[in-house]
Image: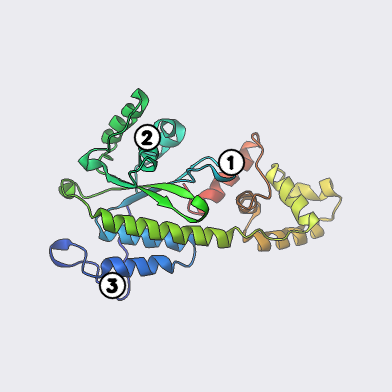
Amino acid sequence: MIAERARPGIQTRGAMGAPARGVLSSHLEHLQRSEDIMSQRGDICAALADFGFSAVAYLGPLNGENGQAPQLTSVGFSNEWEQAYRSHWHQHDPLPRIAQAGHPIFWMGHGLPEHPLSSDERAYLAQLSQWGMRDCVGALCVGPNMRTAFVLVGGRDPSKMLEQPDLGALQAIIQVSFLRYCALLEEELTQPALTDREYEILRLLAQGEAQENIAPITGLSEGSVRTYCYGLFRKLGAKDPASAVLRGVSYGLVSIPPRVPTSVAARHAEALKDAGWR
């Protein structure tokens, strides 16, 4: 569940539990000033909580930029849905396609926009009911250079499920948040300048080599390897070899081979978890 986070100077609730006047504009201002991606994630959670939602999931990029497959980031939705979605249901999710087909925001509690669906897509939508997700709001986000993402917002109080949500406010929150995310991502992904040795060490780490094995492979002393690793980690903003590889992949400097030792794959997965990605 998304914990509601009070903001200094923001009155979060008005009469009858509805968002107070001005709460939307206050949240939009905060979203535009998010300092980094992690704090930006907290800012959108706080904004959505004030409009009665406790879960959000991002899927993007939708347009396959740089050959990337869409990645899922989820907060507040059930682990069962998230695992099933990553495993196979992502192949049969019609919601992003519906949003791209001229329905930039829709409330599933009111029924989906008219759109042809396959039997597998209908099965996925039926499964959403089992996960308590048929009252979600789906929205399309568009950023610079036509970067697009699909956002699913849910987790409403069951007593409010028959009330139509404020789609205009939700669309503003989601879109402003996405624009800030794109700006922060651009800042974070400004590729650092690595020396040839630093790049060689990063490539070996991505291939699954432990840091202690790099000295005999490269012919460097262990002290030199530690020095190069220190410089590499500092440039990448990483704290250890696994997070350095993660950052290197995000910058497009290296890729992780399809088959790396299980221990290495586990370290990469742990780095992703530490970075806030589930």
Instruction: Name the residue that disc number 1 marks.
Output: 67
Q: Type of residue at label 3?
A: Ile
Q: How far across and how far down the image is residue 94, in percent?
A: 37, 34
Q: Type of residue at label 2?
A: Pro
Near-viewer residue (251 or 130): 251
User: Is label 2 in a helix, a strand or a loop?
Assistant: loop
Residue 113 lies in quadrant: top left
Residue 81 lies in quadrant: top left
Q: How far across and how far down the image is residue 181, in percent?
A: 47, 58
Q: Nearer the viewer, mark 1 or mark 3?
A: 1
Near-viewer residue (234 or 47): 47
Local packing at callout 1 (Cα closer than 10 Å; few below 14, some 14-19, many 20+) is: few
Instruction: Name the residue that disc number 3 marks.
Output: 10
Please say whether residue 58 is visible from this viewpoint: no
Residue at x 50% of width, y 43% of height: 63
Q: How far across and how far down the image is residue 29, in percent?
A: 37, 69
Q: CA distance from mark 1 to mark 3?
A: 42 Å
Instruction: Name the residue that disc number 2 marks.
Output: 94
Q: CA distance from mark 2 to mark 3?
A: 37 Å
Residue 52, above or below 210: below
Q: Could you tell me if the residues under marks 2 and 3 are in contact, i.e. CB atoms within 8 Å?
A: no
Q: How far across and how far down the image is residue 74, in percent?
A: 41, 47
- Whichever of labels 2 and 3 marks the residue nearer the N terminus, that label is 3
Q: Type of residue at label 1?
A: Gly
- Whichever of labels 2 and 1 marks the residue nearer the N terminus, that label is 1
Near-viewer residue (61 or 35): 61
Residue at x 72% of width, y 44% of height: 209
Q: Is residue 179 left or right of residue 13?
A: right
